[in-house]
Amino acid sequence: MDWIVQNIGSILVGAVLLLLIGVIVYMMRKDKKAGNSSCGSSCASCPMSGKCHEKNK
């Protein structure tokens, strides 16, 4: 119990960071399932333009 009291700041910061990472991963998976892309939709200047939108062709 004493260790927890001495490190409560680090524990709280770690928990918040873990929560943020979880939310980011959840949102990315949700967008991918919905068919949304994480790119900026500037396919003309993208070297991978032929790969990421390949199924639409």
Image (tube, rainbow, N blue to C red):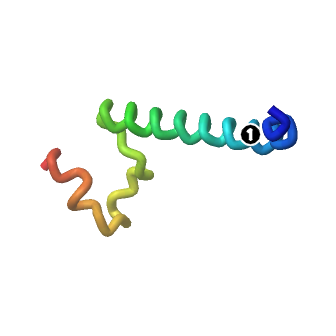
Identify the residue at image location x=74%, y=40%.
Answer: 11
Q: Nearer the viewer, residue 15 or 40?
A: 15
Q: How many badges with numbers are in the image? A: 1
Q: Secondary structure at mark 1?
A: helix
Identify the residue at image location x=31%, y=69%.
Answer: 47
* Residue 22 screen position, x and y as percent: 53, 36
Q: Nearer the viewer, residue 37 or 18?
A: 18
* Residue 31 screen position, x and y as percent: 39, 35
**Location of residue 2 by image quarter:** top right
Q: Residue furthest bottom?
A: 47
The residue under label 1 is 11
Residue 16 falls left or right of residue 3: left
**Location of residue 6 by image quarter:** top right
Q: Hey, what amino acid is under mark 1? A: Ile
**Location of residue 3 by image quarter:** top right
Q: Residue furthest front?
A: 1
Residue 24 falls left or right of residue 47: right
* Residue 7 screen position, x and y as percent: 82, 42
How many C-alpha atoms fall within 10 Å of the one at disc 1: few (<14), some, or many (≥20)? few
Identify the residue at image location x=37%, y=66%.
Answer: 45
